[in-house]
Amino acid sequence: MLLLGVGCTTAPDRPSSKSQLVADMKRATDHHSYSKPEEAVTTHLDWDAKVDFDARQVTATATYAIETADDAKRLLLDCRDLTIHSVAVDGVDTEFELGPERPFIGQPLSIPITPRTQKVSVHYTTSPDAGAFLWVEGDSPFLFTQSQAILARTWVPCQDSPGVRFTYSADVEVPSSLMALMSAVNPTEKSSDGRYHFDMDQPIPSYLLAMAVGDVEFRSVGAHTGVYATSDLIDAAEYEFAEMEDMLVAAEALYGAYAWERYDLLVLPAAFPFGGMENPRLTFATPTIIAGDRSLVSLVAHELAHSWSGNLVTNATWDDFWLNEGFTVYFEQRIMEAVYGRDISEMLSTLSYQGLVDEVDAIMDVNPNDTHLRLHLKDRDPDDGMTAIAYDKGYFFLRLLEETVGRDTFDAFLKTYFTTHAFQVMDTDTFLDYLDANLLTTEALRTAINVPAWVDGQGLPDNCPQVASARIERVDATLNGWVNGTTSTAELPWNDWMYQERYRFLSNLPDNTSAERLAELDAQWGLNATGNNEVLFAWLEQAVRSQHTPAYDRLRSFLVNVGRRKFLTPLYKAMVDTDQSDLANDIYREARPNYHSVATGTMDDLLGWTE
């Protein structure tokens, strides 16, 4: 097991036995899965697959090793848009039943078994429109998956619940000109025949099952870190992510040994709907974080932190999502502080606070209960829970714990938490019991924190930590001067500002800023041509709200070529809010074929599209 020489002597232990693992899987009810792990649970997957780019399909056989209860009669797997050809139980073909389909949940695949059943195989083909897949066509074809939250069931019949963990191996055949990669031990060179074998010996939940196929190459950037990218991006990626090893060393120094042996990163096509996805051993990342100056690598710190919070200790259900994301944002900030300094991490925290306040205000107008840390997602798509609440309200709750008990005490608590619960699942109530027993051990501490107000209360509690960044405060003062005319556009210290400062300035411009004033900014500082996508996004959103039409060609190009939902939603919404729906629909009509289903689902709802 990998050790980086930063004070850790052992890596986190795997569960001591399958029976312990199965017991953990039974802990919470998952409303988004048909599986019944208390009756039969999958513990290992052997996956044999062929990827067909022409048909946009994968044909595969999924063979599971299972653990069964003494009265087991069936194995239930989640399926969505899969064609099931045959099922075998311990090598013998058997009848199976597909239940009725529910929106976004899919169908249950019911397979008869006995308490003595050891293996179940399912031979199937995916749909050309499988929700997890995005097929990029053209001279350089590419396929990637996005399984989180419940899209793994669209490409592998599985117990698609974060509370069910399994190991896996895979044999995958792809066109010989392309390389296949998975969330497993990966090749660093193409095979001659397009055949690849993968092993993942640590148990993972289905949402961390991942695959990508493309014409990519590998570059090492450290003893245990490397990057994959297409030839046109590999040099830039190698430079941009050269400090991943430093981040990994810093993370281990904080919270214990890295459990996954290598930490590599794959730069995906720009249609990837997220900034990053924490697939074990191989983070998937958007090319929009390649800025040329390493200014956006906090996203890498975030996905690396998931190697502990999420991948190692996993939310039992999507109602417990904050246990993954709140912990990860906190850990991300600590990595950024350790590698780049408190100045940088506090600017990032300040931007997080601004985004959180804005999102809380928006959610309170629609469904105040969605501002609870403990989510309420029954009968809803779990994507509804992917808001700043789980991420940033969760972060500020943990920051409050740190500031209340002291950093040294909190670090020791977190390190023990990750080690004690390694390769296990965690639900909110179990964590709160652990918190009371191991950190908030006095009534005075429990009163000071007021856990119920954070976990099951609306909005932001009164004791939310205050973030202080002198650099951000200077930006705000400069902005006020620019708005009231005491600071001219030419006097702005734009070239001296880091991206966080530029983002703060643009994102806080008053909504009534005139198009003429935006034209001044662009003429002086070339904002329309910026290569930092976070700054460009803030600029384009303001351009839409001020109807600064000279930026609209760049807006269209950005929205057609970039599929990151974080950018898409505010930009399309800004057009709708400013009575520019015709423009929004015209751009979306052109861009939609380039987006992943995760993005189109959100944009279709926003713009009122029906297929």
Image (spheres, rainbow, N blue to C red):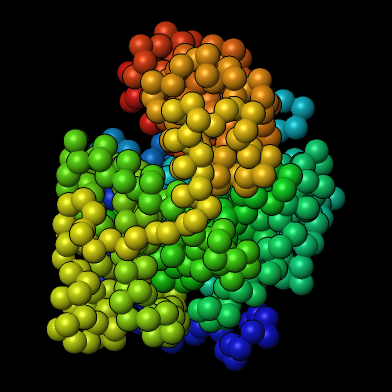
Give the residue displayed 46% in from the left and 42% down from the top. 476
Task: Looking at this view, name the residue that lies furthest to the right.
Answer: 192
Residue visible at 20% across and 69% down?
451
Considering only vertical position in the picture, is 348 above or below 155?
Answer: below
Front residue of 214/411: it is: 411
Camera-nearest residue between 171 and 335? 335
Figure label count: 0
Horizontally, is 578 left or right of 147 in the view?
Answer: left
Residue 228 appears in the figure: no
Residue most toward the bottom?
9
Q: Position of residue 191 (x, y in %)?
A: 81, 53
| Whole-percent x, y for residue 182 in the image | 62, 55
Q: Residue furthest front?
A: 486
Residue at image position (63%, 64%) is 340
Q: Quadrant of the N terminus?
A: bottom right
- Residue 339 to residue 124: above or below: below
Question: Which residue is depicted at the point 58% across and 17% down?
Answer: 519
Residue 328 pos. (x, y %):
45, 63
**Residue 256 in view of the camera:** yes
In the drawing, does residue 250 fall left or right of residue 587?
Answer: right
Q: Nearer the viewer, residue 568 or 227?
A: 568
Residue 257 located left or right of residue 473: right
Residue 591, picture quadrant? top right
Closer to the camera in the image, 311 or 359: 359
